[in-house]
Every structure is written in C-alpha cells, then in structure tokens.
Amino acid sequence: MDSPRAVDPRHKTLFNQHMSRPRMPRNKGNHMNRFLANALLAGSVFGAMGTQPALASPDYPPAIWNPAATCNYTAGRTTPFTHVAVHTTEGSYAGAISWFKDCTSNVSAHYVLRSSDGQVTQMVREGDRAWHIGSSNGYTVGLEHEGRTANPSAWYTTAMYNASAALTRDILAARSLPRKVYDGSRGWNTKLPDADYNVKGHINYANQTHTDPGAGWDWPRYKALVEGSGTGTPPPKAAPGTIVGHNNLCVDIAGGSTTDGTPVQLWNCNNDNAQQWRVSNARELRNPLADKCMVLGNGGAAVDGAPIVEWTCGGQADQKWQYKNMQIVAGNSGKCIDVPQNNRVSGQALQLYDCNDSDAQKFTFEPATGALKTTNGLCVDLRNSISSNGTVVQLWTCNGSAAQKWIPGNGGFRTAVNTNSCLDIDANQTANGTKIQVWSCIANGPAQQFALRGQLENAMGKCLDIPRANAVSGQALQLWACAGNAAQRWSIWQPR
C-alpha cells in the first residue's frame, strides 16, 4: 500500500442493514460443494500462514472469505454500486489482507487478488462500503491486485488478469451492469468520466492522487478478458484507414453499399473497404467504395441530429471536415506527442508523454499543406531539414518548407524532405520523455504508427457524434454541437 486511502470519518454512524441485497448463488445445487471446497482450501492456505481458517466468499463463491475489521469499512450503502475500481497493493497479498484487518489502517477493499496464481480473497461484502477510493467509495467495488506499479511485468501475471476479469465480469453481471471497461486509449492516468466507463483504475476516478494501477496495467487485455473473449490477447491496433470511436467501434458504410444516401454507422472493426477513410487535401473524408465522401444527409443543413451518409464527392461545405482538439497518438503505447513543459517555442524538441489533453498535446493537421501546427501557430519541423536517421523533430516558426510537410500514409507520417523517412519514436521506447525523431520507414513498424485523435468538425462548426453515446454496432451517426465528450472522440490511422 503506498499510503492509506481516503476514508469516511471514524465517528460516522454505521448502517446496520445492507442497502443492496446480497447475490444468490449462480447454481444452488452446486453452491454447497463449492462452499465446502473453498472452506477446505482456505483452511490449508491460511492455516499455513498461522491465521484462522476462512470460509467461502458470500458474494463470489470462487473466493475465500476473510473479513476486514469492521472499523475499516461502512456497513451498507446509501445507493447501489455501479462501478469497479482497479487498485494495486504496492505490497504483498498477505500484507494487504493483514492491513485491512488492522484498525489503525482506516482502509479496506472488497477483494484482494494474488499475483502468483490469481487467488481471490473477499474482505468486504459488495453491499457494504469499503474505504478504498475516497469520494467514490459510495458507488464502487474495489479490487486490490498484489504488486507494485513500478514493476508491472513482475507482478501483473496472466493468472491474476484472468482471475480479476472473471471477478469483474461476475460483479457486473450480478447487477445487470454494462461492461464498459476502459481500453487505455486516453492514457493510463487520465481522469475519465464515470458515464464513459464503469471499470477503470484508481487514478482514473475524480479527486484521486494515487497512481495505481499505473502505466504498466494492460487495459486492452483486461477489457478483452472482461468482455469475454477468453483469450486475454489485446485487440490489435486499428488498421490504417479506419476511424475508431467510443467502445472501439469503427465508422462504417452500412452494408458496404455505394449508393448515395447510404447511412454511415458504427460497426465492429473488420478492416474491409466500408471502413476505410482518408483525409483528402480538400478536407474530405473519402471512402474507396466508389470514391464517395462522408456528408450530411438532410440537404446540407447543419442542425443537431442531422444524419451522416455517404455521397458522391462534390466539394460542398457539408463534405468538408477538420480535426479539432487533436492529439497525435503513438501506436506502440497509446501515449501522445508532447511539447515538454508546454514550452511551445521555436527549437523545442518534441517528446512522447502520457496523453492528458493539455495544450502541449494539441495540434491541427492541414491536409492541403501537410502542416502539423500547435494551437499557438508553430509547425512540427524536421531540424535543419536533415532526414538522416535520428534527426530531431521540433517546433519552428511556420515557413511552408518541405521540413514542415508531413505526408500521411502506412499508419503514420513521412517527411516531404525524404519520403523514405518517417516520423518515429526513438528505439520504439514507451517511456515518458522519449525523443521523437525521423527514421527510415519500416512498413507497419510500431514505432512509426500514429493516429490523429480528436473531434471531427464539419465546415459549419458541428461535430460527428454518436447519438446518446450509444456505441453499439449498427448505430447510425449524426451531426451535433461539439462537446468534446466520448461520443465525439475519434481516432484515424492514416491509410497507406
């Protein structure tokens, strides 16, 4: 544990009744067998540790029940829980269990998971309020994972990921809650709206100072496991040419039709031509199916709720789009190109850093000129117009030179100084502060894969939007006033 969690006042009156009913066993016929099996297991494990044998968990039969001290949590809840918080113990499994049973700690969590084999111990009933995440205690269930955030590869094991995902899936299913698991796409330490994700890390909740589960927690892998893929393999990075939105769904032409007026929708990403898009020099979003464009479908009137369809490209205002509040996201880590200390002056070298939506990470892309510009009007520049491997990429006063022209392709950007030289992350590193440079282009090289991520705004000043943030396959898209929320956040990996 790095430090005690924020807790409820010690003098607060404890509730005597659970505010949400405990779950019934999934299979009543087998429950007693599982109960006895877990009781025997608990006896062998905790007996070896010199502690009192524990019984099976009252909420999750595969877990051991070893309750926290009643002085370290609040009995009952005033509202039902809706979210799961992922924590790291910053110490051992046994140590966390002991700490939650010690009244001097003033902390607890609902579950603790062991690194070596994924063993789960429940310490607080789900219907009670554990003290694990301060102002968010009332609506969350807390899962503490044995480990240290500074050494994730040593602690975050396959066994623990699998056990944790199965537990989270069970928690959500028992309350008929959606599986809105964070995918890591906004950076490991970003504060995430509760409405967007109901499974996220301690650091991702509001009003928190802790950094667990840290940059090494594999969110794509965890999301895939909780959603039930069963493989534990992270979903592949979106293919070049795709536009990916909320819930990792792709912008798609319904049925792959080439007919004018066909709706543009969300669909499971599958890399077919109906999901391929490129930003033209005329600021169009073009699809290779009959070379059609993404347009407004109500005669071009830019009103909230206007449908988005494909149409023959004609250069009209309702066919023009631009990026707004844009970040350049690295494919090898999900981190962003960043201006160190937001020092946006000529000569400042660029770096890789955790995405944080600050001005230091906001750029615009102008297809006609190939310029990548900061919000204060400086251009991303190849230092001294030299394209040799390792040359620094920096900011400089915009001058229209080839050193400031970037050509999208192969999922990244080539410099116009030498089209065989690509925007690159030094040595494919993922650490904050890693140098951004150019290097000989490597087809699909992870160090050279970058997405433009932000809002897609049309020439009338409104944004491509998912109605009610209902990100499911088949959801038709619409135009709506730009709000910067998850329903309007898109990533495009530039096509070859």
Image (cartoon, rainbow, N blue to C red):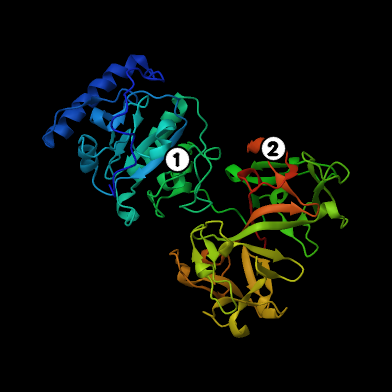
Give x and y (percent) for residue 489.
Answer: 63, 49
- Residue 396 vs residue 411, the one in the foreground: 396
- Residue 44 vs residue 354, the one in the foreground: 354
| 351 lies above or below 272 | below
135 left or right, relative to 275 = left
Q: Does the rendering let one see residue 278? A: yes
Q: Which residue is mark 2?
A: 467
Secondary structure state at the residue bearing disc 2: helix
Residue 56 is tagged as none
Give x and y (percent) for residue 394.
Answer: 57, 76
Q: Which residue is mark 1?
A: 225
Which quarter of the figure has residue 342? Answer: bottom right
* Mark closer to the observer (1, 2): 2
Give x and y (percent) for residue 30.
Answer: 32, 18
1 or 2: tag closer to the N-terminus = 1
Secondary structure state at the residue bearing disc 1: helix
Which quarter of the figure has residue 443? Answer: bottom right
> Hey, what amino acid is under mark 1?
Leu
Q: Quadrant of the C terminus?
A: bottom right
Q: Residue at x 53, y 42 (%)?
A: 193
Asked whether the residues under the numbered discs 1 and 2 touch, taking CB atoms below 8 Å apart as contact, a structural biologist would say: no
| 97 lies above or below 79 | below
148 left or right, relative to 491 = left
Q: Residue at x 37, y 36 (%)?
A: 142
